[in-house]
Amino acid sequence: MRAVVITKPGDPDVLAVREVAEPAPGPLDLIVEVSAAGVNRADLLQRAGSYPPPPGAPAWPGLEVSGTVVARGDGLGPDDLGPGDRVAALLAGGGYAERVAVPAALALRIPEGLPLVDAAALPEALATVWSNLRAARLSPGETLLVRGGSGGVGSVAVQLGHALGVRVVATAGGPQRTARVRALGADVALDHREPDLVARVLEATDGRGVDVVLDVLGAGALADNLAVLADDGRLVVIGMQQGRRGELDLSVLLSKRASIVGTMLRSRPLHQKVAIMDGVRRHVWPFVADGSVRPVVHARLPFDRAADAHRLLETGEAFGKVLLLP
């Protein structure tokens, strides 16, 4: 089968389409004919040589796909997914291929009305957002700040926060992007390119601050994120786009009784991913079925333009997800 492989660590041009061996299902696996694969920042890190795939995962990138089941393992029962079912699935790697093997417990049946291709934009983002909002103990009536509301994860976080009944404040770059973030459900959308972001967040919350910050920026945003937290606030760090090492003023953390949580999805053991996807299936997927949460797709590109797909993420041009199509 065809797959987009990393010929050597480097810039986007090291990606190339090659023939690789087809996957074989384990007893509890599905084989999915891929319609689309989501492109994530973890793929860019893997391409650069700084984020190797976990043991047992294919060498080529891709953490989420949508497609049609064509085979399944002999350990699955009659009520499990099977050939012909349309699914969106979370992977440990290998999604940039014509077929993937995935544990059935990490696959979600695609509801009617959701385009098969666009469904590939959801599994990684929904699993990331849901698991981290749970870790942050976000409750209805609280205020959530989404740093990077126009990104693949952020655009889903804004919609899910709105659907869960919390007040959503989000950041994005420029008036057009902030307007689009408001259209996704943000109560307040702030241009992070404008000065005094902390003051503007505090003004939007009547000086109180936010209960939870969902942050993809990392070190470069650490001080501002702590400054906008309300008392008993929780900062959840899920990315390091602005660096991995920062200085922390512990007096701010202590005086606010605040907490900082850091998580990573890909490296979690399978049983944790299964539990997360079960939560997504029961608590989040109904919002997808009724249209409250929908995929936000910036571009759909063929496999042979994988380098262009990576550049769209690296430049920050993409609003929402970029998808690769076999």
Image: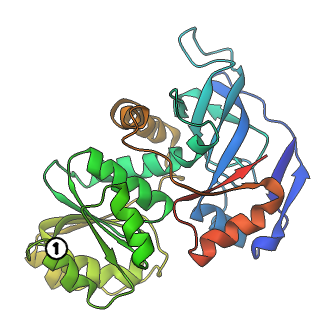
Residue 154, by quadrant, is bottom left
Q: For residue 217, say whether it is visible.
A: no
Q: Residue furthest top?
A: 78
Q: Nearer the viewer, residue 227 or 85?
A: 85
The image shows residue 124 at horizontal and vertical percentages of 52, 49
Labels in figure, total: 1
Residue 35, by quadrant, is top right
Instruction: Work out whether 245 lies above or below 260.
Output: below
- Crowdedness of circle 1 by 10 Å Cα count: few (<14), some, many (20+)? some
Q: Residue furthest bottom?
A: 195
The image shows residue 279 at horizontal and vertical percentages of 37, 35
The image shows residue 205 at horizontal and vertical percentages of 13, 71
Q: Nearer the viewer, residue 88 or 100?
A: 88
Instruction: Work out whether 186 lies above or below 103.
Output: below
The residue depicted at 15 percent of the width and 56 percent of the height is: 142
Q: Disc 1 designates what residue? A: 204
The residue depicted at 61 percent of the width and 77 percent of the height is: 315
Q: For residue 121, say whether it is visible.
A: yes
Label 1: state its secondary structure. helix
Instruction: Work out whether 58 lies above or below 229.
Output: above
The image shows residue 204 at horizontal and vertical percentages of 16, 73
Q: Nearer the viewer, residue 189 or 69?
A: 189
